[in-house]
Amino acid sequence: AVPRRLCILKGIYPHEPKHKKKVNKGSTAPRTFYLLKDIKFLLHEPIVNKFREYKVFVRKLRKAYGKSEWGTVDRLKNNKPTYKLDHIVKERYPTFVDALRDLDDALSMCFLFSTFPRTGKCHVQTIQLCRRLAVEFLNYVIASRSLRKVFLSIKGIYYQAEVLGQPITWITPYAFSHDHPTDVDYRVMATFTEFYTTLLGFVNFRLYQSLNLLYPPKIDGQADVELKAAEGKEYAMDSESYLEKLSALSASLARVVAPTHEDEVEMDEFPVEGETAEQMDARKKEQEALEKHKKLFEGLRFFLNREVPREPLAFVIRCFGGQVSWDKSLCIGATYDVSDPSITHHIVDRPQVGLQVVGRYYLQPQWVFDSVNAKMCLPVADYFPGVLLPPHLSPFVTEQEGDYIPPEKLKLLAMQRGENPDEESEEEDEEEEEEEDEEDDNDKEEEEEDESEKEEEMKLKKMEEQKTQSTKALPVKVTAGKVRLEDKQRLEQEQQSEEKRLAIMMMKKREKYLYKKIMFGKKRKVREANKLAAKRKAHDTAVKEEKKKSKKARRA
Amino acid sequence: PLSSAPLQDIRNTVGNIPMEWYQDFPHIGYNLDGKKIYKPIRNKDELDMFLEKMENPDYWRTVQDKMTGADIKLTDEQVELVQRLQKGQFGDVNFDPYEPAVDFFTHEVMIHPVTNRPADKRSFIPSLTEKEKVSKLVHAIKMGWIKPRKPKDDTPTYYDLWAHEDPNSILGRHKMHVPAPKMKLPGHEESYNPPPEYLLSEEEKLAWEQQEPAERKLNFVPQQFRCLRAVPAYPRFIHERFERCLDLYLCPRQRKMRVNVDPEDLIPKLPKPRDLQPFPTTQALVYRGHSSLVRCLSISPSGQWLVSGSDDGTVRFWEVCTARCMKTLPAGGVVKSVAWNPNPTICLVAICVEQSVLLVNPCLGDKLLYGATDQLLESYEAPEEERVQPVQWVTATTEEHGKGIRLIVQHSKALKQVTWHGKGDYFASVVSDNSNMQVLIHQTSKRWSQNPFRKSKGLVQCVLFHPIRPYFFVATQRYIRVYNLLKQELTKKLMTNCKWVSSMSIHPGGDNIICGSYDSKLAWFDLDLSTRPYQLLRHHKKALRSVAFHKRYPLFASGSDDGTVIVCHGMVYNDLLQNPLLVPVKVLKGHALTLDLGVLDVLFHPTQPWVFSSGADSTIRLYT
């Protein structure tokens, strides 16, 4: 167990030897191999001695308990050996950016542990610490407005923030109690969490410092006073309520220095060498888009209904400059009431809203997430309560050429480019309706078609007559020429493909293997894309048919 | 006690018992006279109770006497008592709980103490046990067994760890370090409301369930929820985090370079087949007539006649240009091999039928020519002394003579192959046997046979004469041995790198050999270069049955069980430094697969760039 803990804390991982047989005494049975260098490195770690001390302490304590020497127990407990992981963090991540790069797992783990119940499984202090660090990080992301993407998956909610240019992705589970599995070793997870909390604490400190915020975080002065006055003595423990207020994510944080408008001063432009004007322009544009994205919800006031998951929504909305509130009985930190007339968006997750107030949109929560991912406020019509929602797409997918792109994404891309696909789609709908109408009067048309066929026959006859009369085979010649041309092209293509096939036959064995592998991968990709497209088509036609049926039923 | 004012004395005599015991009886106890006390008649239902509650102003102070079952209205005193008890006060109004306390012993020192015992001695001298204890502690501290309480560590838990980022602190370890790959980002199918095409159909779901968890492409089933409120907790969330932890500390990490090659770059640049013309490209003629698979082909040196042997027991002679069957010779058995004498002045065909080689004069073409051949055969004079021969030379009977058969060489075992020497006098036959008698060399003019080998070197597949020099090639299963017939020694042993050689052919220049094998490989040997193949070509998908060189053009062909004939350009340069150039130029298809057999023999026309192929579909095809 101790070596395992050491490996986890120091980040030592096994290596795959170059010659498996050589190191494994001739056998190829699967075994894990560590570098000797790594093991020696572990032995030099001062924390090994701390672990030993702790072991001795536990033994002594057990003995004292056994002998009922309470005095000794007290003395031992007073001198309980502790250890710190600071130096390991520093050693594993010599620069701050390194630490940021490895923050994904740390965040996911802390968010998971912070949702654990306070009984069993792990120490209460760990859970509290995880919760505190997670909330601090969320507050930092709000303060720096660095959230970029959100994704509601069936596993949990994925967030992606960009901190100092590093994309940091983490996942939080939905707020339900866990069904704790039995085949999971919680001690391993606890060891990881021990390291991750240390890491995250230092990272948080540094991040807060970089924004001139106080650490540990303080809620901004005025708001703090108001809150205190409002809450009165309802909460017995001040520290706990403070954390809760923080985790409400509704108040801004106190700064070390009063916020000056330094940030808004435009950066001097330093032309980078070897960069053309176009690149500069593109970069500038990107910068502007980013700024715009950051102020997506600026000036909007949201109200969260009680069935809506409060924390993720409050976090996302505040990250993009919106103001948010909720029912006072739902959680501490509500800033305004339902009846506030200045509310612009009311987030509801019910099929129907009982009493609607004029002057605000009632929307489903997906609108917030989709808007963030689309980097623009989407049209609200698709997201009204009780409406069948448009699909929620993953913002992490960047389609390459040849990949399958769902039609919703195409629509979204068009919208981002500034076109207005809505009208088109409406037109399409109209067209569809027209088509339906046409189909309704199919019988008539068929008759017409018959007539037209007759007419065509007549025409053909006339043409033949003309030909025989004129006895000139000019048009015949033209058609013959065309046919030949096509033949030539096809022949050429065939020849080329055959040449290629023959050349493939002459490849070396290894290259042929590689080639076949690459081609197989490509073909599989195409096949998958085609399959998805076919499925979509089938689904669309099924939906259309159903629509038609219902329409007919309505008409009847 | 509550029934303090009874009008008549209805005292219950049951005593202090749980009154539930009388629940099911009409009476509630017995009076002093031993008569039953009946329960008061209760016919009030809920409504009556409610009405009473509403209307009776004394309802709140009415209680039921459990002993008698009668309703009793409490008096004001009783109500007051109840209220006092409820407040936790004493029941007696007059009781004063705060009376001044009178000490039993006074704290003031009196002149007469209660006890007057003198103080103990032990209260004057230091305690020994305490001393012992103290000295133990002192000793323990001295010895370092007890440590004084540690001073509280008051450094903050978190501080700016990276305040002084030192570039020197980046050690070799960090350069060697392979950071763990990040977790895969979720795609559309993981969404709680994915586009409908990402949802699994019933069959896909079933297939997903039947797959091993490690083999699944997705580790979850995509699901669609109508709204965010309906999304449940993901049951495997903790599992996934745990697996990630295991990956982080138990998975070996390795840097793998992704090959980022354009597949088009891998295709070798070869000269265009168009520049390598002439070669056969299209099927020109089909020779039909056989009723079973056509095993072997041979062509007259002039290129006008074609002979084919088939499993239906006939040998047919065809005119090449017209596809007309000129002659059919019933051979009386499966024809394994035919060979036309390469000498243009002799018109003779050797045919392998079961245990004998028939030498047949087809009587086609120039009458002078075939007459001369007959004369040549008849001019044979038997030597004086009979020599012992491994085979029997028999002259054909008149009936057979009429068919064209001139000589019969009878072997002791079934034959496999027959091949002529370039000059047309000698021919070699291969017997399917495991002894040293497998290969025999015969001389037609002297009707004399000999066995060149003393020892068997394995199962001989085929033999071949060198076109120019006195070399003899023997292909066994895996090797080709080259013998010098003059010196009577082994010159070379070629490793074919194949499992089972099926056929071989020699370049007219005599320095290059190709050999086909049943493991669908074709090996090209350069005899000057090495005993290993210069190139192994894996063009066919199935076993090669036959290979052939063209006499004039730099072409060679191979026929395979997959029903195709592949014609390759095989240029051999006179310059010894330049390696032969091998380019496949055409894949010829036409033969239908029957009994899993495709092409059985291929043969080039001696002068034209034409190729013949005989197939298991009992046809012979000519490609020009």
Image (cartoon, coloured by chain):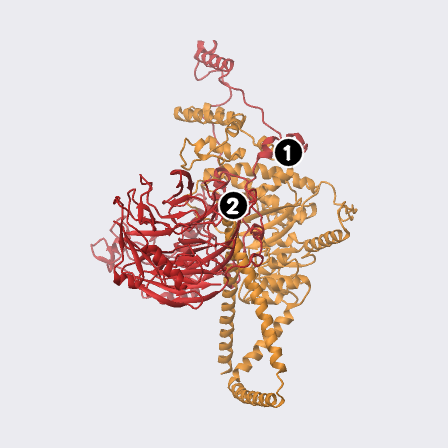
Spot occupied by residue B573 in the image (x, y as percentages of width and height): 55, 47
Q: Is residue A197 visible?
A: yes
What residue is at 61 percent from the left and 67 percent from the top? A381
Q: Is residue B410 above or below residue B484?
A: below
Chain under label 1? B
What residue is at 40 percent from the left and 48 percent from the top? B464
Residue type, mark 1 in image? Leu
Mark 2: give few (<14), some (14-19) or many (20+) Cα within 10 Å: many
Please indicate whether residue B19 sits to the left or right of residue A460 in the image: left
For label 2, the residue is A112
Q: Is residue B103 above or below residue B422?
A: above
What residue is at 55 percent from the left and 81 percent from the top? A437
Q: Is residue A352 above or below residue A221?
A: below
Chain under label 2? A
Spot occupied by residue A413 in the image (x, y as percentages of width and height): 63, 61
- Colour chain A is painted in: orange
Question: In terms of secondary structure, where does tag 2 sit?
Answer: helix
